[in-house]
Image (cartoon, helix red, strand yellow):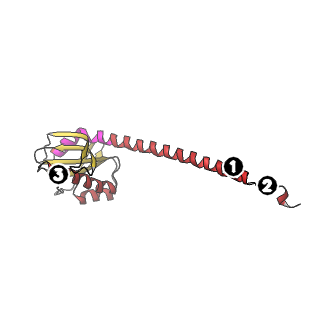
Amino acid sequence: MPATENAEVLTFEKVWTMFQETDRKFQETDRRMKETDKRIGELGNRFGELAEHLVAPSIKEKFKDLGFTFEQISQNHEINDPLGKSNTEVDLLLENGEIVMVVEVKAKPAQRDVKEHIKRIEILRRRADARHDKRRFQGAIAGAIMANAVRDNIRKTGFFVIEQTGDTVKISNPEGFKPREW
């Protein structure tokens, strides 16, 4: 007796039903993956918020140790380009009559964060120019976890490196460091 006699006969309707069931399972899997991605993103945002709360309380004092005196510090500014082309958000902004320090805070900074921070400061510089604000803009990137290659790139770009150390932060740039200015 040939093996094919015991096999179920596949009809178009049966194959179509199997395709529909497979499609339903793929859609359910896709929905679950999107939900998981959303939750991971929310968790990443929470880590970022935690890092900001670790940096903000002591950042003025840490810069004061380097000779900077900032009268104002503010958090989470949304900035519009004067030409209406770009929007950006600034995590921490420290200001005085001469310098604006733009600080990006990440739980774990990556190389792309350095490039994005340059763009952010360029937007702020254009906005300041449109308002005849002649203050110098400098940047810093803060992180709770910092890979050596990222730290080196941050310094090479001319940004201050702010790292978590215990329950506070430190600015870890070498002696003689010259920050980039916009």
Question: Is residue 60 in the magenta section?
Answer: yes
The residue positioned 24% from the left and 38% from the top of the image is 57
Q: Which residue is mark 3?
A: 137
**Could you tell me if residue 63 is visible in this image?**
yes
Q: Earlier in the sequence, mark 3 or mark 2?
A: 2
Can you tell which mark lies on residue 17?
1
Q: Which residue is mark 2?
A: 9
- In the image, residue 39 above or below residue 11: above
Q: Earlier in the sequence, mark 1 or mark 3?
A: 1
State the residue in front, 174 or 59: 59
Question: Is residue 4 in the magenta section?
Answer: no
Range drawn in magenta: 51-63
Q: Quadrant of the C terminus?
A: bottom left
The answer to the question of whether label 3 and label 2 lie on touching residues, with beta carbons closer than 8 A, is: no
**How busy is the neighbourhood of tag 2: few (under 14 within 10 Å), some, or many (20 plus)?**
few
Q: Earlier in the sequence, mark 1 or mark 2?
A: 2
Amino acid at the residue labelled 1: Thr
Q: Position of residue 127 (x, y in %)?
A: 18, 49
**How busy is the neighbourhood of tag 3: few (under 14 within 10 Å), some, or many (20 plus)?**
many
Distance between mark 1 and mark 3 Cα atoms: 63 Å
Q: How many marks?
A: 3
Q: Position of residue 159 (x, y in %)?
A: 23, 54
- In the image, residue 19 above or below residue 92: below
Distance between mark 1 and mark 2 Cα atoms: 14 Å
Can you tell which mark lies on residue 118?
none
Amino acid at the residue labelled 3: Phe
Amino acid at the residue labelled 2: Val
The residue positioned 27% from the left and 56% from the top of the image is 154
The quadrant holding residue 164 is top left
